[in-house]
Image (cartoon, grey):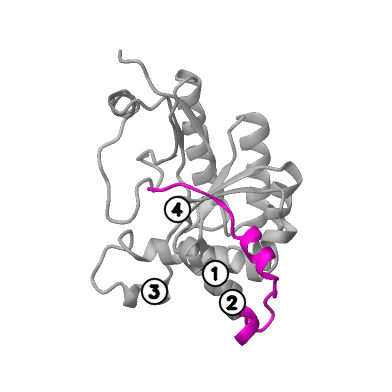
Amino acid sequence: MAVRAKIIDVHSHPILPHGQGAPVGLGPDWSVESAISYMDEHHISACVLSDPDSANHATGQEARDIARRVNETLADIISRHPSRFGAVATLPGQDADGAVTEIAYALDTLKMDGVSTSTSINDVHLGEPQFDPWFEELDRRGATLFVHPTFTKATQTLLIGLNPSVLEFMFDTTRMIANMVATGAKKRFSNIKIISTHGGGTIPYLVNRIQMLEHAFGVGPGRLELSPDEVSGRVSLRSTTT
């Protein structure tokens, strides 16, 4: 086998029979063996697996069951290939109590590397108070949160015939980061290590505009006004590029 570079891919989605897996419209065949072969071909030492959105479209016990099955499947893959895979857990995002329970199980029992979710859940972007209970738990633990974009019902009419992964994923990531900052959630939960995928959306381009215009026009009702230095500091989330 070729010598592998010290590359760790933190944005890798397994396609599981009981999960959602790849972004909308994409469903390639996936197996542990094919993933390892791909990693070897491209000199990737390890992949951190995630299935962020699988349990966010269900509620109650159904959502809890989906999250548990996904997380135990990912943990099993890690147990068989500990040097090649890590994973961040799936949460039942509409169920605050279930999410807190799954965080404890995934991090304490399964020893996963963090948790994952989508930029919005049931059309509500991260940063809103309904997510506070499990954000508080992640903050208490100083956990890693991997956030992957999705799209809301409102934006489906704006896709101009394009797959959402082409443009809308970038914009939904941007909305999530802006909402996290403007609601004060990023500041309140500052111990969470957030990985914002796809290069942070358009935030790298917009940060200077936000710094200038939030004081000229106001941020918005109930939104947090920050100094230019605070804006740049709050939006500097870790990012992946694909």
Q: Residue at x 29, y 28 (%)?
A: 38
* Badge 1 element: helix
The three-letter code of the residue at mark 1 reads Asn
Residue annotated with mark 4: 199
10 Å crowding of disc 3: few (<14), some (14-19), many (20+)? few
Question: Could you give the CA–CA distance between mark 2 and mark 4, rounded to whole angstroms?
Answer: 22 Å
Question: Could you give the CA–CA distance between mark 2 and mark 1, rounded to whole angstroms?
Answer: 6 Å
Task: Pinpoint residue 9: horizontal percent, then vertical percent.
Answer: 43, 35
Which of disc 3 and disc 1 is earlier in sequence? Answer: 3
Foreground residue among 35 and 106: 35
Q: Residue at x 46, y 27 (%)?
A: 85
Residue annotated with mark 1: 208
Question: Could you give the CA–CA distance between mark 2 and mark 3, rounded to whole angstroms?
Answer: 27 Å
* Badge 3 element: helix
**Callout 2–callout 4 Cβ contact below 8 Å:** no
* Badge 4 element: helix
Q: Residue at x 49, y 25 (%)?
A: 78
Q: Is residue 124 magenta?
A: no
Residue annotated with mark 2: 212
Q: Is residue 221 magenta?
A: yes
**Callout 4–callout 3 Cβ contact below 8 Å:** no
**What span is colored magenta in the figure?**
214-242
Foreground label between 2 and 3: 2
